[in-house]
Each structure stands twice: as C-alpha cells, then as structure tokens.
Amino acid sequence: MSSVRRLSLVTDEVRATMPERRAGALRVAIATQDMKNLNAHFGSAKRFAVYDVTREEWHLVEAVAFDDVSDESGKRRTEGDDRITPKVEALKGCHLLFCLAIGGPSAAKVVSAKIHPIKAPQPQTIQEVLLRTQMMLRTCPPPWLRKVLADAGVAEKKPSFEDED
C-alpha cells in the first residue's frame, strides 16, 4: 500500500482531506518533482502542488507527496500494485491537472474523477503555468475550460437576450 503525505497550511485544526476551495477559484494540480517546476509525468510525479487560482491571484493550497511512483520504464508491476488510484483519490476536488504526460488508463481515471488533464509540451515553471491559467480565465476561455468552470461553479452568468436592464 502506498503512503500519501499532505502538506497544507492550517490555522487551528488538523485536516485529513483537501482544504475547502476558495470562493470563485479554480483548483489546479501540477505534477512536480521539486515544487518549483511542472516537470513530471503523472505516474512518476513525486509531488503535486495544488493551487487555488482566480483571475487576480493564486494561493498554494497544499503539496501532496507520494512514496510509490513509476520509474517511467513502461514495465508493469505485479498484479494488484495500483499506484494510480491513490493519486487520483488525493487529487479529487481539483479541476485541472497539469503534467508532462499521462497514460490512457490514468487519464480515464482522472477524467472520471471530474479532473481535466492537460499535457504540457515541455517542462516549465509553476509560475508560468499559473500565469497562463490566469490569462485563460481573464480572456475568452476555450470551450473545454468554460465547461470546467461551469461544472466548478466558477463561471460568471452570461447575460441572456431575455435579461432586461
């Protein structure tokens, strides 16, 4: 069984689950080996940096660390040795997942947990990922992001032709 460690900022209570999302924020998970860069495949990520992102700011919510990760060799491990499900469970509540790569079965599990996976073409800093996410929120978000925002309850109500001033 793999162990999961959570590092989060708390005030007066210990939490065993992910902290509540800030109002109007999109929860974003970033696969990282060093907590500075998006530089990991989903299966081999030792950590996920989890942020709440709005148009104006972002806040680190927590860092989730894993002991049992893939070595990216492509070889299957023993039957019943599931490293993916604990990661998906730990990231539930996130809306977006940024990683360098994710396999088909892993992507299916992530999507079924209502997390939208996004593959980055090359490593980049976490700050660049967050700035790009904010830019998408500030401008006209692509259709897939509008759906994520609507599902998350973050999207602003669009004016209707029936609305009168």
Image (cartoon, rainbow, N blue to C red):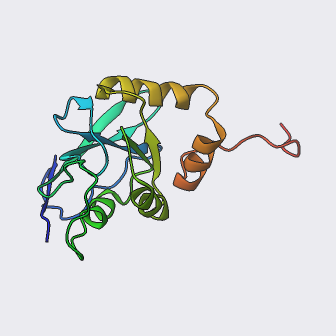
Q: Position of residue 140 (x, y in %)?
A: 64, 29
Answer with the quarter of the image where residue 19 lies: bottom left
Lateral position of residue 32 relative to residue 13, left or right: right
The residue sitting at the bottom extreme is 80
Which residue is at 40% across, 53% downward?
A: 103
Q: Position of residue 11 (x, y in %)?
A: 14, 50
Which residue is nearer to you in this view: 80 or 155? 80
Which residue is at 83% across, 36% downward?
A: 165
Which residue is nearer to you in this view: 151 or 96? 96
Q: Position of residue 145 (x, y in %)?
A: 58, 42
Lateral position of residue 113 relative to residue 82, left or right: right
Query: Which quadrant of the figure contains the N terminus?
Result: bottom left
Lateral position of residue 36 relative to residue 85, left or right: left
Q: Is residue 99 above or below residue 57?
A: below
Lateral position of residue 161 relative to residue 84, left or right: right
Which residue is at 42% across, 58% downward?
A: 110
Which residue is nearer to you in this view: 93 or 155? 93
Q: Is residue 125 above or below residue 86?
A: above
Q: Position of residue 150 (x, y in %)?
A: 60, 50
Which residue is at 21% across, 53% downward?
A: 70
Counting the numbered discs, the total is: 0
Q: Is residue 119 above or below residue 37?
A: below
